[in-house]
Every structure is written in C-alpha cells, then in structure tokens.
Image: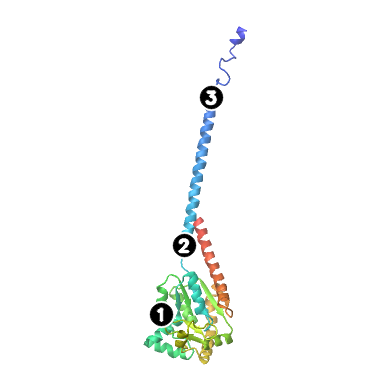
Amino acid sequence: MASYVNSPAMTLCPPRLSPSKPLCCCFSLNKSASRSSFSSTRNAVVSLRRTKFQAMAVAAAEKEAEPLRIIISGAPASGKGTQCELITQKYGLVHISAGDLLRAEIDSGSQNGRLAKEFMEKGELAPDEILVTMVKEALSKQNGWLLDGYPRSASQATSLERFGFQPDLFILLEVPEDILVDRVIGRRLDPVTGKIYHLKYSLPETEEIAARLTPRFDDTEEKVKLRLKTHNRNVRDVLSRYEEITVRIKGDCSKEEVFGQIDKAMAKLVQQRNTSASRSLAS
C-alpha cells in the first residue's frame, strides 16, 4: 500500500487543482472571448452611428436638393397660366411668364414695349433682342423656376442654352385648335389683380370684378389664329431641343385632370433626383 502511495506516477493534488496550466487556458479563452465581444459591440455601435449619419445626410441632401427648373409650353389659351398657379402652390417654384414680361413692358410705354406690341398685333413673336434680355434677367434672380411660354423658337432655345439655363422637365400642353379659339375669345383680364377669367369656364367671383374685366388686346379670333399659325410653325424646332425631357399633357380636360398628369410627371422627377442623391451618399 505504501509503495502504491509513494509511486512517482501519483500526484498528491486533487485532479481539480492539479495543473495550473488548464486554468490559464480557461482564463485566456475567457479573455479572448471578452475582447471579441467588446470588438463586436464597438463595431455594431460604429455601424449604427454610420447608418444614422448616412440617413441624416440623405435627408439633408433631399431637403437641400437643387431646386427644379421647369418649362411649360403650349399654344395660346392652352391653360399654361392656370397650371402654373397649381404648380407653384404645390412645388413652390417661382413663376416667370414671358407673356407677362412683354405685356408689362408694353404697359410701361417704353420703346421696346411699343416695338413688341407692333409684332404681337400681327400675331408674330416679339423680337429676340427684346424678350431674350428680359427672360435672362428674370431667370438669373432665381435658383429654381417655372418658365411659362418660353422659348417659342429655335433661336430663343439656343439663347437659353448659351446663358446656361437648362430645364429639368419640358411640359407641353396639347389642346385642339377649335377649343383654343373658343378659350381665347372668351378670356378676360382683371386690370386690378392681373387675374385671368373666362366668360364660360371661369366666371368672376363678384359683380364688381365682372364690371371691370377687359379683353386683352391680342385676344381676338383673328389674332389668335395668326398666333396659332406662328406657334405651330415653331413648336417642332423647340421640341427637338428638349425631346428627352418632354412630357406631353392632354390639355382638353378639367384643370384638375390636367394638373394630375403634370403632378405625376413632376413627382417622378423629384423621386428620381432623391434616389440618385441617396445612392451617391450611400456609396
């Protein structure tokens, strides 16, 4: 028995206390696991912060996105003014009407105004040297804009490009000619507010307003037919410049239905721009 106890092969330490090395291994494993856990947590926090930062950056980019630049075109009385009101109400764009700029110049009695009136009374476009300068000055004051009724010729489109004014979307209102003539001859202007009414489609709110309404000097059947002839002659050249960004709108329906078509096209454009900005930031 004694020889068995004193055998070199035996150890006096209980098995659970015998070697210290296994305990070191356990400690080492626990230490490694702790480091791994800490590293994973840190990476998760960093990833969360990065994701949060990217989301904030994308939101900021969408909010601060470059303002839209829109051109709306169509024949006289196609409804451009009405749709411009609805567009500006929803999208906050600055409405710049080439026709209003010209009429203001005519009302001022300036030399340019008198010259422009001579052309407009014949159903022709005002000379580019008059209109181009006015439009350029108006656009230069705005970051985003809704340009109404311009350009109306290839030379005017060329001038826009030369000055660096490139639209994001070209909206074309299409209305049959007989409806256009009917719209023009019934159109009336409120000289106090500048608002346009129609004797059939858009009656004035009060008798006081109705009493002061006047027809515009170029809103006669004879002149509108001349203007339509000029429009049809030039519109193809203008469209060829903006073919890739043109959306054609059926304009012989209610103003709400017309705007619904326009709104759909503009919402799609905004979504595409936001998606592009998001992808750019994410990468």
Q: Secondary structure at mark 1?
A: helix
Measure the alpha-carbon separation of dots 1 and 3.
90 Å
Q: Camera-side residue: 188 or 237?
A: 188
Measure the alpha-carbon separation of dots 3 and 2.
62 Å
Q: Nearer the viewer, mark 1 or mark 3?
A: 1
Residue 169's mark? none
Residue denoted by label 2: 63
Q: Where 44 falls versus 79 (above or below)?
A: above
Amino acid type, label 3: Lys
Q: Secondary structure at mark 2?
A: helix
Residue drawn at the location 47% of the way across and 60% of the way down: 61
Q: Residue 208: name its quadrant.
A: bottom left
Q: Secondary structure at mark 3?
A: helix
Q: Camera-side residue: 115 or 178?
A: 178
Q: Earlier in the sequence, mark 1 or mark 3?
A: 3
Amino acid type, label 2: Lys
Residue denoted by label 3: 21
Q: Camera-side residue: 94 or 66?
A: 94
Which percent across, then down, holds residue 203?
51, 83
Q: Nearer the viewer, mark 3 or mark 2?
A: 2
Q: Earlier in the sequence, mark 1 or mark 2?
A: 2
Which percent across, then down, holds residue 210?
47, 86
Measure the alpha-carbon separation of dots 1 and 2.
31 Å
Amino acid type, label 1: Met
Q: Earlier in the sequence, mark 3 or mark 2?
A: 3
- Where is the N terminus found, in terms of image quarters? top right
Residue denoted by label 1: 134
